[in-house]
């Protein structure tokens, strides 16, 4: 009989990576979330070969203290929560303290950072199983760069599941799109194999936000949608964003973005409420297009449901469902009279 023994930290990280790091797009999601959490207002992504060869993200956020660099790559190490109460009302995108540890266990990762109060930058790297604990001086402006090379170089089974460069990049671009739609105050750039794919300026006005929408979802979406912003007084729930007109329905549900407190989510309660609101005005089999933001007290939503944090649990799901349904239903009802042009003369 084999005796029970503790897993080495590296093996434990690789097992955890199985949950969080499925493909280059998942790495980009985690890195971008970290940059947004750091307060950056500018992030630049450089991708090579669909992200398998290289993912490099540079931000101008708050950076990481030299002394904390090795910790940033350790599992269960985070600066974002400290106690159970924090977990019950998470305000940041990250909180699990796992992403960098997981990613570095299945790639060659270098983390370079300089907080504003530090004279110069420092870097730390890890190559899969081997953590090079050594911290070396580096040249870098205030902020952080994470470089992830050769994803899954040491886990061939994972690597085999990767699709073509084009497909991997498509997934990755979708992640960037979602995060760019979640955070208008941040400027984004995305380059693939040296070519600029997206260049999005920080958007601080309605016009600028619509320009970003149009860059990411197409001019037609903006032209064929209405903006809304509704807040319920009693519950404090707020729903804002853009709803596609019924005439802009789609054959696929490919333009549906729903954010809860800035986090893109998939949720049955939400999907059902939206679908119900559109029910009377869409042909069977057609899907509405929308970009919607629900904002509510973080204590009313549990984000610690799944490692990828794509799922949430509402404390009062009935209330949330009815608020979304009623709000959207009213907007749709208001759209209708415009279907028939006013009589001439
Ligand atoms: P989490 O985001 O759940 O805390 P991560 O493994 O993603 O865990 O990151 C670990 C820690 O490293 C973070 O809590 C944060 O303090 C720091 N960190 C990671 N990326 C950045 C960044 N781009 N800017 C500043 N700090 C960062
Ligand atoms: Mg994180």
Image (cartoon, rainbow, N blue to C red):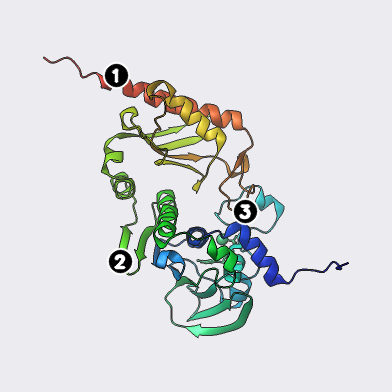
Marking on residue 337: 1
The reply to whether residue 199 is in sight is yes
Tell me if mark 3 has few (under 14), some (14-19) or many (20+) residues whose alpha carbon lies within 10 angstroms of its own: some
Image: 257 above or below 82: above
Quarter of the picture containing the C terminus is top left
Please state the quadrant of the image where ligand 1 appears: bottom right
Tell me if mark 1 has few (under 14), some (14-19) or many (20+) residues whose alpha carbon lies within 10 angstroms of its own: few
Q: Mark 3 points at which residue?
A: 307
Q: Mark 2 points at which residue?
A: 195
Q: Name the spot of residue 340 as percent of width and height, x first.
A: 24, 18
Question: Which is in the foreground here, disc 3 or disc 1?
Answer: 3
Sequence-wise first label, 2 or 3: 2
Query: Residue 283 sits in which quadrant?
Result: top left
Query: Residue 199 sits in which quadrant?
Result: bottom left
Query: Residue 165 sits in which quadrant?
Result: bottom left
Quick check: is the Cβ at mark 1 less than 8 Å away from ligand 2? no
Residue sitting at 75 percent across and 69 percent down? 7
Look at the numbered disc 1 and give the secondary structure of its residue: helix
| Closer to us: 317 or 170 | 170
Quarter of the picture containing the N terminus is bottom right
Question: Which is in the foreground here, disc 2 or disc 3?
Answer: 2
Look at the numbered disc 2 and give the secondary structure of its residue: strand
Q: Name the spot of residue 177 as percent of width and height, x first.
A: 40, 52
Sequence-wise first label, 3 or 1: 3
Question: Which is in the foreground here, disc 2 or disc 1?
Answer: 2
The CA distance from mark 3 to mark 1 is 45 Å
Residue sitting at 33 percent across and 30 percent down? 245
Sequence-wise first label, 2 or 1: 2
Q: Name the spot of residue 143 as percent of width and height, x first.
A: 46, 70
Tell me if mark 2 has few (under 14), some (14-19) or many (20+) residues whose alpha carbon lies within 10 angstroms of its own: few
The CA distance from mark 2 to mark 3 is 32 Å
The reply to whether residue 76 is in sight is no
């Amino acid at each position: 009989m084999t005796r029970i023994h503790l897993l080495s930290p590296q093996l434990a990280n690789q097992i955890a990576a199985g949950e969080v790091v499925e493909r280059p797009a998942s790495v980009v999601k985690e890195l971008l979330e970290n940059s947004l959490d750091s307060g950056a207002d500018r992030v630049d992504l450089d991708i090579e070969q669909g992200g398998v060869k290289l993912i490099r993200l540079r931000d101008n956020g708050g950076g990481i203290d030299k002394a904390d660099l090795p910790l940033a790559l350790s599992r269960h190490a985070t600066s974002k929560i400290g106690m159970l109460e924090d977990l019950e009302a998470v305000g940041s995108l990250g909180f699990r303290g796992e992403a960098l540890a997981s990613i570095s266990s299945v790639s060659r990762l270098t983390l370079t950072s300089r907080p504003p109060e530090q004279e110069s930058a420092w870097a730390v790297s890890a190559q899969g199983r081997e953590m090079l604990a050594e911290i070396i001086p580096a040249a870098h402006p205030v902020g952080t760069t994470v470089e992830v090379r050769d994803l899954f170089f040491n886990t061939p089974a994972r690597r085999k599941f990767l699709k073509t460069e084009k497909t991997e990049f498509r997934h990755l671009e979708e992640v960037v799109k979602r995060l760019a739609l979640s955070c208008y105050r941040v400027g984004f750039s995305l380059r693939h194999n040296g070519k600029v794919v997206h260049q999005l300026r920080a958007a601080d006005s309605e016009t600028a936000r619509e320009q970003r929408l149009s860059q990411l979802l197409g001019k037609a979406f903006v032209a064929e949608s209405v903006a809304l912003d509704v807040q319920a007084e009693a519950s404090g729930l707020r729903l804002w964003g853009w709803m596609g007109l019924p005439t802009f329905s789609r054959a696929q549900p490919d333009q549906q973005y729903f954010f809860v407190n800035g986090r893109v989510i998939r949720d049955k309660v939400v999907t059902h409420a939206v679908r119900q609101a559109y029910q009377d005005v869409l042909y069977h089999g057609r899907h509405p297009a929308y970009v919607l933001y629900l904002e509510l007290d973080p204590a009313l939503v549990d984000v610690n449901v799944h490692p990828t944090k794509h799922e949430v649990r509402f404390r009062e799901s009935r209330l949330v469902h009815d608020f979304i349904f009623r709000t959207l239903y009213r907007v749709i009802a208001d759209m209708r009279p415009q279907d028939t042009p006013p009589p001439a003369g």
